[in-house]
Amino acid sequence: MTTMSMDRIRIRGGHRLSGEIAISGAKNASLPLMAAGLLTEERLVLSRVPVLADTTTMGQLLAQHGIAVERITNDGHTLSLGGAITNTEAPYDIVRKMRASILVLGPLLVRTRQARVSLPGGCAIGTRPVDLHLKGLEQMGAVIELDGGYVNARAPQGLHGATIVFPMPSVGATENLVMAACLADGRTVLANAAREPEITDLCDCLVAMGAQISGIGTDRLTIDGVHALHGAHHEVIADRIETGTYACAAAITGGALHLAGGRMDHLGAVTRTLAEAGVEITETPTGLDVRRMNGLHGVDAITEPYPGFPTDMQAQYMVLMSVAEGASLVTETIFENRFMHVPELNRMGANINVHGKSAIVRGVPYLSGAPVMATDLRASVSLVLAGLAARGETIVNEVYHLDRGFEAVEQKLAACGADIERIPG
Ligand code: EPZ
């Protein structure tokens, strides 16, 4: 899974899903947690890390910084990280594959007082600047220059604490600055910080490594720098986006699924929105039970920072709405260009019109299978959902997007009755 897969996925729609799906560890928690391995020379053991193209890429990035990254269990889900930083440059060739590479900047800078990290550039879902990461580090004493597509950062006196008020919550900037602040001199306050469950998971791990952080889970984090962090063992939280995605899969096929390990308290606005649309989610001792009540109804959704409706669920939710009764308005406020799945869904018979930041989805009685392709990872899984519900055969191309973020998607769905298979490319 290290090279870009040209595989395709074939789905024959119309099968109700039933059974159990084990939810994997969260990709977007694992990536910053792996970057936290740069904060200590001792061993950081992370369990429940999903085996995905993106976690493999992060492993490669850390390895070239000098950190030994080993998968120490047969299932590949437990990673051991450790070692000294021998190289402080994050090269374009790795960063261009995965924007989350920028998360090494804060840790490298606070540990070695210098870092050179390729600028990630734009991507399919929007321009996605990193100015908030850089400004925060400057407030902590870094001197930053942009040169030849790289961020050159130095902190000759080391980083010091600062009060940083974000103009808007940013997941990645909050993570970068929390990691840097753990080893900076003095107190850092991050106000209007993002408070996604992945950030809470990172903070919990940092505390286990000896960091002093208060306000965890809120939008105001206070971090008192310490001299060194030590090793720890941390289990990654279950992936809330994968959970929500399979909840939509159960609903759209009129089925019922048990999502083992799924957590209601991480779903935020998703639970309420799906409930209004006619999808029941109940918590059990081992996870979540999801089933569709009667019909699906059109319900509006607007993407917002956590605990609002996640942008990473917008495409999947739109597929559900495309076969619901009535119309719904789906508004994207986080990324400016995250409707690329719409033309593909319309080719499958959906009736969706985009007007600026909003899409009007008018429910249709059924979707029809078609060859489709995706431009980002959440869009590609939305096409898989559409294929599960559609009449006939759907071929999803450009599957490497899917492989970045969904572990064993075709095995998990096939085990619950979907007619889905990977066609090697
Ligand atoms: C994280 O991206 C996730 N990635 C994204 O998931 C997710 O969509 C996003 O958060 C929002 O929830 C990871 O966790 C690895 P942001 P991130 O900084 O950190 C603007 C997926 O599919 N902004 O919270 O990059 C930015 O343009 C991915 O798994 C600035 O203006 O998101 C956006 O409009 C896609 N300047 C908003 O803030 C900055 O310096 C929120 O972005 C940083 C961000």
Image (tube, grey):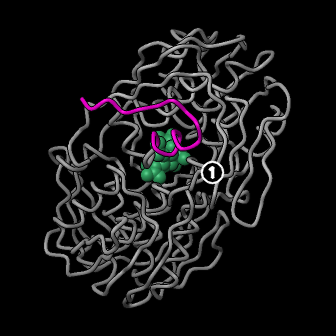
The answer to whether any part of residue 176 appears in the image is: no
Residue of label 1: 20
Answer with left or right where residue 124 lies relative to residue 221.
Answer: left
Q: Which amino acid does label 1 sit on?
A: Glu
Answer with left or right where residue 167 lies relative to residue 173.
Answer: right
In x, y percent, where is residue 109?
Answer: 28, 70
Residue at (22, 65) in percent of width and height: 115
Above or below for 334 versus 112: above
| Quadrant, the C terminus | top left
Q: Does the residue labelled 1 lie within 8 Å of ligand 1?
A: no
Q: Give the range drawn in magenta.
A: 409-425
Residue at (59, 18) in percent of width and height: 390
Rendering quarter of residue 13: top right
In x, y percent, where is residue 141?
Answer: 35, 71
- Given residues 69 and 36, the one toward you in this image is 69
Rendering quarter of residue 184: bottom left
Q: Does the magenta stretch include residue 294?
A: no
Above or below for 290 versus 162: above
- Given residues 385 and 358, the one toward you in this image is 385
The answer to whether any part of residue 112 appears in the image is: yes
